[in-house]
Image (tube, rainbow, N blue to C red):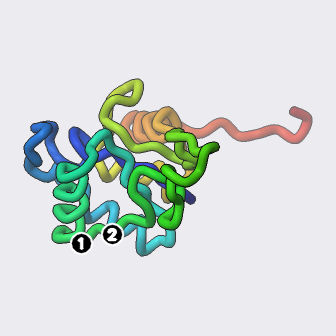
Amino acid sequence: MIIAVDFDGTIVEDRYPEIGREIPFATRTLQQLTEDRHRLILWTVREGRLLDEAVEWCRQHGVEFYAVNKDFPEEEPEKNRHFSRKLKADVFIDDRSLGGLPDWGVIYRMIKEKKSMAQLLREEWEEDFHVEKKKKRWWF
């Protein structure tokens, strides 16, 4: 799976243009996703020196990206007249998404188990309230 990840407010607290403190478990989760053979793309508004600082911060914290602000490492936007800044990713992890950023443990479960937030919440609710799952009948 190709996963695009924002930096400010997602991996680190939003202190742009400074680099904020790491959001708990962000780098460890990203490392695990890489170990699970997903391709991570850093997808951020940062450019130039600020982008270099973010990439280096991630590298120092054990996170290497497949690509940065593009679909694949060899892509050269300035040489491709059909280049689009829209990434072709399966999942986008961003603090600005509808509903906000879940904690990194939930993010990992959603990707690993291929479940939506609604499915995880429903399962948690059923577990908390000891709800028996309905048995399927053969004629339905």
Viewer-proximal residue among 10 and 121: 10
Residue occupying image coordinates x 87% and y 32%: 140
User: What's the residue type where badge 1 is placed?
Assistant: Gly
Q: Is residue 37 left or right of residue 80?
A: left
Residue 125: percent from the left, percent from the top?
41, 34
Residue 99 occupies quadrant: top left
User: Which numbered marker is on residue 62?
Assistant: 1
User: What's the residue type where badge 2 is placed?
Assistant: Glu
Secondary structure at numbered mark 1 = loop
Residue 139: percent from the left, percent from the top?
91, 35
In the rendered view, tell whether residue 23 sits above or below residue 65.
above
Residue placed furthest toward the right: 139
Write down the residue under mark 2. Answer: 64
Quadrant into which the N terminus falls: bottom right
Viewer-proximal residue among 138 and 51: 51
Viewer-proximal residue among 28 and 115: 28
Number of marks drawn: 2
Residue occupying image coordinates x 38% and y 65%: 65
Q: Is residue 111 left or right of residue 13?
A: right
Q: Residues within 10 Å of mark 2 (few under 14, many from 20)?
A: many
